[in-house]
Image (tube, helix red, strand yellow):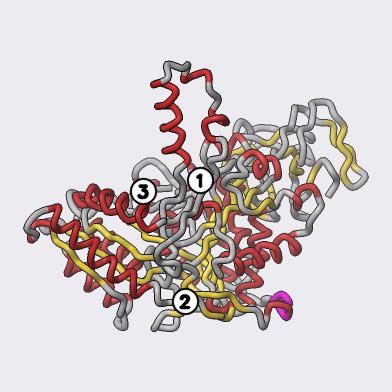
């Protein structure tokens, strides 16, 4: 790597700009000079040789596109001169032979987690409120306002204080617009107030827009998703609010919980509005019973647990041209380390694996897993194409602007989060993770739908890489945000936990970065560090209706 460009794989015929390069500038790489035909922005690519229309574009060592017109050596590669193309053989061609990394220095390390009766271990201890239908969202909001502020779980009062300052300025007949936002926020850092229940990490609410009015299939899928969250190892107990007449009946939800975990033994309180004397009385009773449940949940304490009990979901969002070079492969190193330690890693976002299928198929341990992955991928893409879309349309305008100009380029970089480990299993949406190792999970690429699906399959931490910045979190799964570049980490320091920009500058190797990420995960899993998504209350939850969502 020079300080200006990067050649990712020895077979690539493009170079990646690590900094802004100017037209007519001569760039040297491995004793060859490239005269740039255009301005090349950082994160973008240019051709290493003259290309004709139809020629293949190779990046990460795989086919990521084809030229749609002649491209000169040193010319910018972008949407105007290439289109998506990828190897789509889908047949398992070879067995996986994996050289696991040396994990001797972590072999005896532990994290402090919450051991559940079924042997799984949580990284947090949450009480969960679940509505069976959107009609109960308002009642959940009343309960949320009452419990979070009174019990010390409201993440911050700074915006309330901001409004109070504005009110006082207005009452004093001062010019409200003359005060800067910085001044309004001064000395109003995020505050975690004293909690009545110190061993309960939070009270969480799964507000959603489903449960009735759509198809019965949507309600049935939502039931499986809610059951997965109720059964999650980060959840200590559940309060269910039901209207009564909706498609998603409480009995169906209870059945799905038992199907998922026949040994389910968490406290489960159910309140049905149409059977209650009044709405007020139902809410009061729900608060009262939940309070008794919180007393019991507070008796559970963290205990030392082996790292093999960790289940980490890996996700990228707001990706840029550095995602597949810095943060994603660094997370891949972490993934490999955890797999070697006997833990579980969940790689999802099937639209963002489009173009990387062959590598993943070949990495499947069994032919059954390879077949399941192929079947799920083809069915999902066919569903998208049936409505005039397709996986090839996945890159967003922000992705394209920052160098991810085809889905194959985006996918090849996104797949790096899964490291190099064999694929132990393939899971459909909401299927629970059972096997140790790397697991592929069918979800959309959409940030919140994907993180929602990872938690449903059992992720107890999520590593979320971003090059452009995103405030995404998850309601029950602490989400750690990693930046691909230092500029973003400095600009959005309020949401970024780990800066992987040192990989781009050459200050850190991928191995060093991956090891740092694992150490951070151990601290976050132990409650010693609270990721900023948790501090900011980024409790995102969007069910996938299995319609077309990329």
Residue at 52 percent of width and 31 percent of height:
184
Label 2 belongs to which residue? 301
What label sits on residue 172 in the rendered view? none
Answer above or below: position of 420 versus 155: below
The residue sitting at the right extreme is 31
On the rendered structure, is 243 left or right of 511? left
Question: Which residue is at a point 25% across and 71% down the rendered structure image?
Answer: 268
Label 1: how many Cα within 10 Å (few below 14, some 14–19, many 20+):
many
| Secondary element at image label 3 | loop
For the residue pair 200 and 80, the one nearer the viewer reads as 200
Left or right of 20, for residue 413: left
Query: According to the image, label 3 marks what residue?
Result: 548
Q: Nearer the viewer, residue 112 or 232?
A: 112
Q: Which is nearer the eye, 319 or 30?
A: 319
Task: Give, as a single range, the part of the protein colored magenta.
Answer: 99-104
Q: Are marks 1 and 3 in contact (CB under 8 Å)?
A: no
Q: Quadrant of residue 93?
A: bottom right
Above or below for 82 versus 382: above
Q: Is mark 2 in CB contact (under 8 Å) with mark 1?
A: no
């Amino acid at each position: 790597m020079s300080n200006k460009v990067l050649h990712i794989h020895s077979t690539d015929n493009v170079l990646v700009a690590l900094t802004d390069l100017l037209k007519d500038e001569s760039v040297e790489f491995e004793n060859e000079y490239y005269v740039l035909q255009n301005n090349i922005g950082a994160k973008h690519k240019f051709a290493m040789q003259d290309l004709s229309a139809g020629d293949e574009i190779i990046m990460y060592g795989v086919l990521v596109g084809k030229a749609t017109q002649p491209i000169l050596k040193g010319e910018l590669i972008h949407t105007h001169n290439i289109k998506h193309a990828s190897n789509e053989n889908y047949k398992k061609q070879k067995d996986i032979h994996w050289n696991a990394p040396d994990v001797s220095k972590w072999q005896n390390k532990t994290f402090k987690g919450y051991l559940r009766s079924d042997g799984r271990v949580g990284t947090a201890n949450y009480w969960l409120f679940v509505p069976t239908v959107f009609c109960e969202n308002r009642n959940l909001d009343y309960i949320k306002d009452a419990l979070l502020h009174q019990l010390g779980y409201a993440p911050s009062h700074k915006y309330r204080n901001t409004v109070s300052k504005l009110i006082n300025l207005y009452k004093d007949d001062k010019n409200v617009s003359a005060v800067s936002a910085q001044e309004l926020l001064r000395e109003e850092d995020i505050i975690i107030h004293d909690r009545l229940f110190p061993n309960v990490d939070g009270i969480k609410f799964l507000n959603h827009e489903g449960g009735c009015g759509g198809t019965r299939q949507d309600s049935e899928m939502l039931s499986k998703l809610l059951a997965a969250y109720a059964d999650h190892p980060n959840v200590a107990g559940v309060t269910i609010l039901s209207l009564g007449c909706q498609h998603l009946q409480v009995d169906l939800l209870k059945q799905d919980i038992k199907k998922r975990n026949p040994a389910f033994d968490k406290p489960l309180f159910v309140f049905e509005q149409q059977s209650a004397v009044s709405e007020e009385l139902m809410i009061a009773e729900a608060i009262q019973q939940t309070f008794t449940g919180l007393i019991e949940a507070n008796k559970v304490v963290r205990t030392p647990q082996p790292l093999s009990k960790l289940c980490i979901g890996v996700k990228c969002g707001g990706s840029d041209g550095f995602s597949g070079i810095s943060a994603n492969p660094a997370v891949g190193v972490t993934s490999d380390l955890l797999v070697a330690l006997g833990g579980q890693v969940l790689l999802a976002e099937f639209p963002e694996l489009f173009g990387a299928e062959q590598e993943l198929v070949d990495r499947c341990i069994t032919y059954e897993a390879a077949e399941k992955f192929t079947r799920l991928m083809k069915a999902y893409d066919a569903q998208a194409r049936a409505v005039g879309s397709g996986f090839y349309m996945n890159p967003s305008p922000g992705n394209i602007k920052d160098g991810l100009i085809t889905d194959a380029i985006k996918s090849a970089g996104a797949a790096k989060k899964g490291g190099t480990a064999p694929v132990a299993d393939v899971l459909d949406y909401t299927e629970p993770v059972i096997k140790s190792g790397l697991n592929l999970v069918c979800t959309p690429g959409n940030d919140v739908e994907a993180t929602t699906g990872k938690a449903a399959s059992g992720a107890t931490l999520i590593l979320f890489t971003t090059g452009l910045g995103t405030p995404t979190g998850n309601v029950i799964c602490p989400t750690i945000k990693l930046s691909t570049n230092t500029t973003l980490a400095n600009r959005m320091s309020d949401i970024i936990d780990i800066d992987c920009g040192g990989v781009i500058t050459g200050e850190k190797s991928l191995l060093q970065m991956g090891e740092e990420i694992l150490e951070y995960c151990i601290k976050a899993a132990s409650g010693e560090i609270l990721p900023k998504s948790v501090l900011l209350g980024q409790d995102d939850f969007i069910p996938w209706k299995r319609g077309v969502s990329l």
